[in-house]
Image: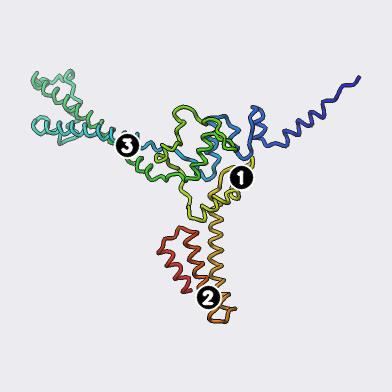
Amino acid sequence: MSSMSPIPSLKRETDLFTSRSPAEIEALKYDRPYDRTRPWERYAMGYPRFAAFIANDEDKSTTIYRRFERLSARNILYLESELTELEAKQDELDEESRRDEDLASSAQSWEELHSQANYNKTEDFSVDSSIEERARKGRLATAAQDRLELARRIRSTLKEYHKALKLESDILTLSVPNKRTLKGVRRVFKNYDRQGKYRSEMIAGKMETHLDEENKGDLCVLAAPAEQDRLTRLLEGRFAFIFRTKTAEGVTGFVSHRRVAIAVSAFSTISAAAFLIGAIIGLYYVTSPTAKLGMLSGLTVAFAGSLGLLTNARRQDVFAATAAYEFL
């Protein structure tokens, strides 16, 4: 009695794996569904997956984080309050030095201040040092040590305060995230599927409200903002499917701002050349003065309209560019 050969089954299993990408095979090992358009889904749910989602964006427009402006402002206020107290303490010691002739010398000389602070009466074996003199030097040593300790505290706190101010200044210059990008990142963070069905938060705990509407004003994006003229918004919205990024695993849901910028630049260059060349060719072939006037008027209106509708040009820029085109 012959038994069935396992070779066909083995061949089908081999074909199943060889037809898949390495990422899909890795996902199958852990019994996780894998979407070629969402390569980050092969990572474990939570921080690993959301970090992979951010890292997969070639334009880094998804590097959206909170500024924590309220906490930052409070931290700066605490540092300022601490410095105010230290400043008042130093003013008090300075006034004491002004009234005491023994302390006046240390207020004028850093070397004298150090010398007084390093005095040790247990090591003062000088014959000329009386009990009163040693007591006076001990009092000066204590005062000098207090002043040095205060100076070091001021130096450390002031450095931290200035660093906090500089960092806050840099953070305030960061741009707010693009509305469309923020909406897409929220969908991933909320872990919606392709049918728009909510599954669960990507990250649990207090971090669940990371991208909620209540934190909208506190969000910033680390990447430099891409130019958002009307043509760019049109291409990234209606024609986003053309500009999706590609990885080794396939096409993702990201829109490549770099590819959109190249397309906008190409379109603008071709349009500008078309308006100039079109006017030259029209003047060459059109002989009727009335037709020439109508053609030039139409081209001028079209040129001004393209500037106003497809770019972020200001009103005065549109006037200047139209006048220059008409002059040429």
Mark 1 Cα-neighbour bin, 10 Å: few <14, some 14–19, many ≥20: some
> Residue 123, percent across and down?
18, 19
> Residue 41, percent across and down?
59, 34
Inspect the image, locate mark 1, and give the three-letter code of the amino acid beneath it.
Lys
User: In the figure, 200 relative to 162: above or below?
Assistant: above
User: Which sits earlier in the primary sequence, circle 2 or circle 3?
Assistant: 3
Return the residue at label 1: 246
Q: Quadrant of the N terminus?
A: top right
Are the residues at dot 2 and dot 3 in contact (C-beta closer than 8 Å)? Answer: no
Inspect the image, locate mark 3, and give the three-letter code of the amino acid beneath it.
Ala
Toward the viewer: 254 or 155?
254
Toward the viewer: 20 or 209?
209
> Residue 315, percent across and down?
41, 63
Mark 2 Cα-neighbour bin, 10 Å: few <14, some 14–19, many ≥20: few
Q: Secondary structure at mark 1?
A: strand
Return the residue at label 2: 294
**Residue at 36% across / 37% down in the picture?**
69
Discs 2/1, front: 2
The residue lying furthest to the bottom in this view is 288
User: Which sits earlier in the primary sequence, circle 2 or circle 1?
Assistant: 1
Toward the viewer: 171 or 217?
217
Return the residue at label 3: 73
User: Which sits earlier in the primary sequence, circle 3 or circle 1?
Assistant: 3
Residue 18, numbered circle:
none
Inspect the image, locate mark 2, and give the three-letter code of the amino acid beneath it.
Gly
User: In the figure, 216 relative to 47: above or below?
Assistant: below
**Residue at 53% across / 49% down in the picture?**
257
Dividing the picture into quarters, in which one does residue 52 lie? top right
